[in-house]
């Protein structure tokens, strides 16, 4: 994606540390974040922007939930699964969360192997991550269809405030879309890793730029972010 | 303040990033249409924005015809009038001003001014434009959709925005409007990320942040704000789209229409206002900050004097940007929110006056004892300062809760924001086009036509908006299709309205002179040479004019000084380009 870094020059090595280093970096020429590539910087700033989107969604949800005069459906009951005749609250969501958190682990390992230029292990771990992601989306689809079968709609539900269904479908749907996009990206990058694009410096189809193993880490940043957002959605929807 | 360094003979740090390999286009299509060159993308952005801006101009004519001469034009009925208002506002704020400042000037100037070959991700940059074009086309489609465009007012307040009595509320209008905004935001994000990363990570050797021209500071701060503020609009649009299409009740309270109880219930219209203005207020500064930056450079260049208080100018931009994220509810004093909110938001709003005043004083102090050349860019810059001060002062009225309440929703508000975020930034846009057109095309714009354009536009917009303050002060409400026989509206208001309308028609017509000038000078303009204004900044130092793909030829520029070395004592010329090494003179680094 981005231009490769030159080996750190003497000037870079002699930078002061801590707060003085921060000031020195921002006062310097060329780059404010030393040793951060363009691609990585861009992903971080995108994630900052995306944080505001999820933040607005969640604040809108909280505002709707606090403002409504009709009782809010009880999440412990709504999200319970009946297993062997017993209502187990939050079991599905616990599994989903576990799967997604695990996928962050495999993603981190993929990044590690990527920098070791271990093509096979990197690709395999990325595929595993994608598989976890797809499982998550699949279980979300299951959860959605269960709720829909029970009569939850964006405009109403049998148990209380209509905003329950609206916010639930909107926010989990938006998050699910993020996961799906992440899975697609993982598959694309895994294919490139597998094929050895980053070893042969093959150029991208659209951008005609040389790829680097760093793209694995950039994908990973996105993936961990989606994972982190889920923790908030989980807390605000299922535990509140 | 910080360290005292002369900057003379100081070694420039070695390159940290290898020179980029650009995609080299092979065909006419990839060179001029699906181009990844930021300069071509900039021109595409600007052309599209100006084209859609002409639609907004015509809409404003139609509105003024109705207000000035009510009942004369049969084809303007109340519904049409509201559609004109809505589309005029939305086009001007988002599709013209935001797109032109950030997509147009941002794309053209950022890589050139910071000494980069292009934006960091040219492909995403190209997508940004094409997605913007789709957003514009969706917007235009709403004019031809059944029921016409939405007439909800540019703020799109629910519940009325999606009810059947609002034009487009139950037809396609509002759907296309919201979709277009969502598409715009997606496209903008792709470009915006590019602008920020290019400035932070893609500068030339020697180009420190505190050596950047203020234009870049203004544009990049505005872009950061846009990346943080547009999400709120995105969320608001998605939620209202669901309210309209799926029947959710995010923003819709229990409501009955035409005696019929609707299915909605329990939603909060105020929530929309908060989301909208969390975007909407920063949006004012997203438009204003690039204007601040550009005008600083115009004044400095054409007064042949370094900008006064460069550091303070930079910090003022950053502080204004930060503060403007926490003032949004001053648009909502009459919405019925908690009065304590009003206290908080009035305070933050008035604090913004401090950094803004610093900027105005610094512009004036830059002019003081400068070698002022009354070129067209300078005229527009001077006009901007005057207009911005005027518009800013009425902002102090509207920022105070007790003064705002009686003035809210009157023509006074219309006059205020047209002065401050309509006329003022547009004057800067004109000034900037007169200033950079020679670099973009290699030819000067015609001076005589430019003078006609300037004086008509400048004086004409005062003829429009100055009387409008008085109309507002006597209590004439805004967004009224016609005033009719109203006891508190004196006869003079009607004649004033007719006067305003005539002035608006004339000012609109003057823009045609400008467009003609743009096209005519392309072939017949005087040859400009590489640096007709004898300016210091990097974009004027390119080896070729107009700059080719990749901007700099073989060698990237190296920067040795700040952007404002004008009239340096002892220097052979009255300007020293930023990339000129050697015995430079005292720069701000030594002074501070």
Image (tube, rainbow, N blue to C red):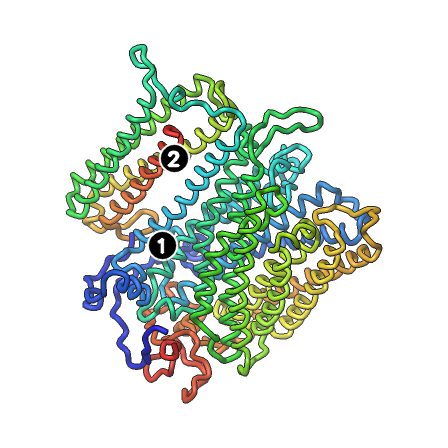
The quarter holding residue B141 reads top right
Would you say B247 lies left or right of B125 here?
right
Tell me the mark number nearer the camera, choosing from 2 and 1.
Answer: 2
Q: How many marks?
A: 2
Query: Closest to the observer: A88 or B127?
Result: A88
| Drawn side of residue B380 relative to residue B229, left or right | right
Q: Is residue B263 above or below residue A24?
A: above
Badge 2 is on which residue? A175
Q: Position of residue B400 (x, y in %)?
A: 61, 55
Which residue does the image show at 52% across and 40% down from the upper left? B237
Residue A64 in the figure: left or right of residue B259: left
What is the number of the mark on residue B535? none
Q: Give the residue at mark 1.
A: B121
Name the residue located 58 percent from the left edge and 28 percent from the top edge: B265
Disc 2 and disc 1 in contact, CB within 8 angstroms: no
Residue at the (39%, 57%) spot, across then down = B196
The subunit carrying tag 2 is A
Placement of B7 over or under B276, stated as above or below: below
Q: Position of residue B184 (x, y in %)?
A: 50, 46
Q: Which element carries disc 1, helix, strand or loop?
A: loop
Q: Nearer the viewer, residue B145 or B591?
A: B591
Chain designation of label 1: B
Q: CA distance from mark 2 to mark 1?
A: 26 Å
């Amino acid at each position: 994606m981005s231009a490769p870094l030159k080996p750190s020059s003497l000037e870079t090595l002699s930078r002061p540390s801590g707060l003085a280093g921060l000031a020195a970096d921002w006062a310097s020429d060329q780059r404010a974040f030393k040793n951060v590539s363009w691609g990585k910087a861009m992903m971080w700033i995108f994630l900052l922007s995306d944080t505001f989107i999820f933040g607005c969604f969640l604040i809108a949800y909280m505002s709707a939930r606090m403002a409504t005069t009709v009782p809010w459906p009880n999440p412990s009951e709504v999200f319970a699964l009946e297993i062997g005749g017993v209502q187990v609250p939050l079991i599905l969501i616990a599994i989903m969360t576990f799967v997604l958190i695990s996928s962050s682990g495999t993603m981190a390992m993929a990044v590690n192997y990527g920098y070791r230029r271990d093509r096979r292990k990197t690709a395999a771990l990325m595929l595993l991550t994608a598989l976890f992601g797809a499982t998550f989306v699949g279980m979300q689809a299951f959860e959605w269809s269960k709720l829909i079968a029970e009569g939850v709609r964006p405009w109403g539900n049998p148990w209380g405030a209509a905003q329950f269904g609206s916010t639930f479908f909107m926010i989990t749907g938006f998050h699910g879309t993020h996961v799906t996009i992440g899975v697609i990206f993982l598959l694309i990058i895994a294919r490139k890793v597998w094929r050895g694009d980053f070893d042969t410096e093959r150029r991208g189809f659209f951008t005609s730029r040389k790829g680097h193993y760093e793209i694995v880490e950039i994908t990973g940043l996105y993936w961990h972010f989606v994972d982190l957002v889920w923790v908030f959605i989980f807390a605000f929807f299922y535990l509140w | 303040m910080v360290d005292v360094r002369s900057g003379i003979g100081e070694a420039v740090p070695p390159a940290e990033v290898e020179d980029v390999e650009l995609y080299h286009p092979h065909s006419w299509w990839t060179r001029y249409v699906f181009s990844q060159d930021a300069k071509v993308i900039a021109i595409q952005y600007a052309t599209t924005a100006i084209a859609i801006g002409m639609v907004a101009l015509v809409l404003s004519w139609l509105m003024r015809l109705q207000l000035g001469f009510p009942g004369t034009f049969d084809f303007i009925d109340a519904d049409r009038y509201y559609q004109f208002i809505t589309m005029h506002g939305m086009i001007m704020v988002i599709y013209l001003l935001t797109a032109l400042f950030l997509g147009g000037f941002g794309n053209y100037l950022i890589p050139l001014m910071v000494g980069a070959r292009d934006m960091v991700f040219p492909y995403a940059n190209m997508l940004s434009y094409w997605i913007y074009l789709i957003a514009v086309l969706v917007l235009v489609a709403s004019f031809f959709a059944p029921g016409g465009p939405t007439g909800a007012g540019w703020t799109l307040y629910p519940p009325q925005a999606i009810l059947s009595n609002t034009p487009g509320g139950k037809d396609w209008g509002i759907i296309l409007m919201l979709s277009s905004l969502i598409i715009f935001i997606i496209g903008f994000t792709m470009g915006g990320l590019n602008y920020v990363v290019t400035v932070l990570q893609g500068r030339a050797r020697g180009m420190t942040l505190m050596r950047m021209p203020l234009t870049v500071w203004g544009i990049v701060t505005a872009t950061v704000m846009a990346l943080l503020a547009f999400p709120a609009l995105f969320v608001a649009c998605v939620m209202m789209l669901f309210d309209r299409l799926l029947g959710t009740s995010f923003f819709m309270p229990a409501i009955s229409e035409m005696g019929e109880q609707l299915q909605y219930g329990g939603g909060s219209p105020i929530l929309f206002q908060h989301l909208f203005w969390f975007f909407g207020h920063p949006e004012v500064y997203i438009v204003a900050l690039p204007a601040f930056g550009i005008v600083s450079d115009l004044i400095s260049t054409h007064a042949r004097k370094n900008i006064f208080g460069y550091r303070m100018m930079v910090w003022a931009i950053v502080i204004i940007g930060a503060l403007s994220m926490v003032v949004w509810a001053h648009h909502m004093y009459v919405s019925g929110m908690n009065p304590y909110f009003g206290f908080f938001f009035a305070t933050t709003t008035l604090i913004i006056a401090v950094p803004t005043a610093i900027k105005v004083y610094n512009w004036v102090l830059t002019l003081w004892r400068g070698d002022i050349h009354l070129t067209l860019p300078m005229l527009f810059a001077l006009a901007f300062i005057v207009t911005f001060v005027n518009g800013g002062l009425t902002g102090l009225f509207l920022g105070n809760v007790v003064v705002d309440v009686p003035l809210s929703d009157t023509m006074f508000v219309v006059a205020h924001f047209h002065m401050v975020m309509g006329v003022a930034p547009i004057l800067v846009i004109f000034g900037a086009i007169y200033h950079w057109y020679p670099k973009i095309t290699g030819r000067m714009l015609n001076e005589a036509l430019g003078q006609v354009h300037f004086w008509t536009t400048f004086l004409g917009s005062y003829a429009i908006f100055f009387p409008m303050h008085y109309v507002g002060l006597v209590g004439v409400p805004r967004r009224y299709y016609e005033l009719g026989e109203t006891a508190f509206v004196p006869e003079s208001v009607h004649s004033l309205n007719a006067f305003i309308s005539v002035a608006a028609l004339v000012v609109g017509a003057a823009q045609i002179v400008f467009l003609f000038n743009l096209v005519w000078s392309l072939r017949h303009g005087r040859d400009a040479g590489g640096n007709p204004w004898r300016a210091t900044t990097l974009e004027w130092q390119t080896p070729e004019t107009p700059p080719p793909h990749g901007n700099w030829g073989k060698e990237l520029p190296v920067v040795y000084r700040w952007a404002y070395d004008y009239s340096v004592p002892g220097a052979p010329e009255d300007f020293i380009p930023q990339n000129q090494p050697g015995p430079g003179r005292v720069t701000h680094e030594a002074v501070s």
